[in-house]
Image (tube, helix red, strand yellow):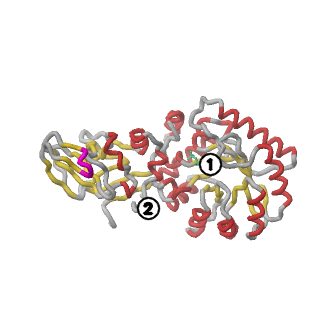
């Protein structure tokens, strides 16, 4: 063991989640989004598990992320989700990564960097207003793709802004516009094999968005995309894939009235046993977790974090319980409680406390934390 803090990632959970999604969206394919090192789970653990679960392909944000998959021997289709700097494009071509385009400039870059009949997906901005071709430019860009020997139109896609709020009519507005775009492309003679619009929330809550494939990220890691689609996620029986563990590295008794950690912001009201865990904000445990009632599990009991989380260590209040150096602590995951029941802390719980989303929590677990496949 290289250090007393690590993450465990369940390949079986990812495989199960992809299978469950694949059953839900069939005949659409599931492409697993493994950008940002597999949402902090380790892309090289997540990608094979997702493919074992039936994913038809993988999506990444950066060419380097795709190259890493290829260097690990993964031969499945990989789509890079946005346009890339010219200096990355030749790498993408060499490694057979499908590229996203929304400008004729990017087409020229692909041609200059050796593309030949290279599969591209044309991204359309139907309302997310992040990246994508303007609706009125789509046929012109598709014509340019058809006229170029460097590329071939493999897919057309868009991205939903409020898929996790299924009642919002903006979803249908985006999907209506996307259907119009596809119809215009068909009239102009373009018939891409893959038409896609849904992220995890889209796949769960918007059957009309499933089309020929869905790009599922957060759900394959067993996390609901948001409270608005929590019931659909529960219905699918998603299993969280990541657990974050540490071992107690130091134990001491502190007296009532003593204070702790930087800024001395916590004062003990009574004599207390304090355990130190050897991980902190440099590992992705937000510094502020102490101020929002963040806790960890030790001995099957929730223990409050006391004092600000420091860069490499944090402290927890263990009351009068016997806790020893080397005891197991769970930051995200499950333990057996004292009465034999399961006690659990989820990435969603951290996110709720910190007023963010679980995506940010799992992506924030830093490279210093070793990911172990279980
Ligand atoms: C273009 C695109 N598609 C799909 C996804 C996957 O989203 P989710 O993790 O919500 O499934 C993302 C993630 O941000 C994305 O940017």
Image quarter where the C terminus lies is bottom left
Identified at 60% across, 63% down, the residue is 66
* Count of number-bearing discs: 2
Q: Which residues are magenta?
A: 261-265
Residue 134, magenta (yes or no): no
In the rendered view, would you say 74 is above or below 355?
below
Identified at 72% across, 46% down, the residue is 124
Q: Position of residue 50 (x, y in %)?
A: 55, 54
Is the Cβ of the residue at disc 1 closer than 8 Å to that at disc 2?
A: no
Q: Report the residue marked by disc 1.
A: 215
Between residues 261 and 196, which one lies in front from this camera angle? 261
Res 181 label: none
Between residues 233 and 87, which one lies in front from this camera angle? 87
Q: Residues within 10 Å of mark 1 (few under 14, many from 20)?
A: many
Identified at 58% across, 70% down, the residue is 71
Is there any visible trace of residue 227 in the rendered image? yes
- Magenta part mainly helix, strand or loop? helix
Q: Position of residue 256 (x, y in %)?
A: 13, 43
Q: Position of residue 370 (x, y in %)?
A: 40, 62
């Amino acid at each position: 063991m290289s250090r007393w803090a690590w993450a465990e990632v369940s390949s079986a959970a990812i495989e199960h989640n992809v299978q469950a999604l694949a059953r839900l969206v069939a005949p659409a394919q599931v492409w697993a989004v493994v950008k940002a090192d597999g949402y902090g789970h380790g892309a090289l653990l997540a990608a094979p598990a997702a493919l074992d679960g039936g994913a038809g392909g993988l999506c990444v944000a950066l060419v380097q992320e795709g190259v890493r998959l290829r260097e690990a021997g993964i031969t499945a289709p990989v789509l890079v989700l946005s346009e890339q700097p010219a200096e990355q494009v030749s790498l993408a071509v060499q490694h057979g990564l499908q590229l996203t385009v929304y400008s004729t400039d990017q087409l020229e870059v692909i041609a200059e960097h050796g593309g030949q009949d290279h599969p591209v997906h044309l991204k359309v901005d139907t309302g997310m207003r992040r990246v994508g071709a303007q609706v009125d430019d789509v046929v012109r860009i598709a014509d340019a793709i058809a006229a170029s020997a460097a590329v071939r139109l493999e897919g057309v896609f868009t991205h939903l802004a409020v898929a996790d709020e299924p009642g919002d009519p903006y979803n249908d507005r985006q999907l209506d516009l996307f259907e119009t775009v596809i119809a215009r492309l068909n009239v102009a003679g373009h018939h891409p094999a893959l038409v896609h619009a849904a992220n995890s929330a889209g796949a769960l809550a918007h059957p009309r968005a499933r089309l020929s494939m869905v790009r599922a990220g957060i759900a394959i890691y067993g996390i609901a995309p948001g409270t608005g689609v929590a019931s659909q996620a529960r219905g699918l029986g998603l299993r969280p894939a990541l657990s974050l563990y540490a071992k107690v590295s130091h134990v001491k008794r502190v007296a009532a009235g003593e204070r702790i950690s930087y800024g001395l912001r916590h004062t003990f009201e009574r004599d207390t046993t304090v355990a130190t865990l050897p991980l902190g904000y440099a590992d992705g445990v937000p510094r502020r977790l102490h101020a929002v009632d963040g806790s960890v599990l030790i001995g099957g009991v929730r223990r409050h974090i006391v004092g600000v989380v420091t860069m490499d260590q944090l402290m927890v209040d263990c009351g009068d319980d016997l806790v020893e150096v080397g005891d197991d602590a769970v930051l995200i995951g499950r333990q057996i409680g004292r009465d034999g029941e399961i006690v659990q802390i989820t990435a969603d719980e951290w996110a709720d406390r910190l007023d963010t989303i679980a995506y940010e929590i799992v992506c924030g677990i830093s490279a210093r934390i070793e990911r172990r496949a279980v």
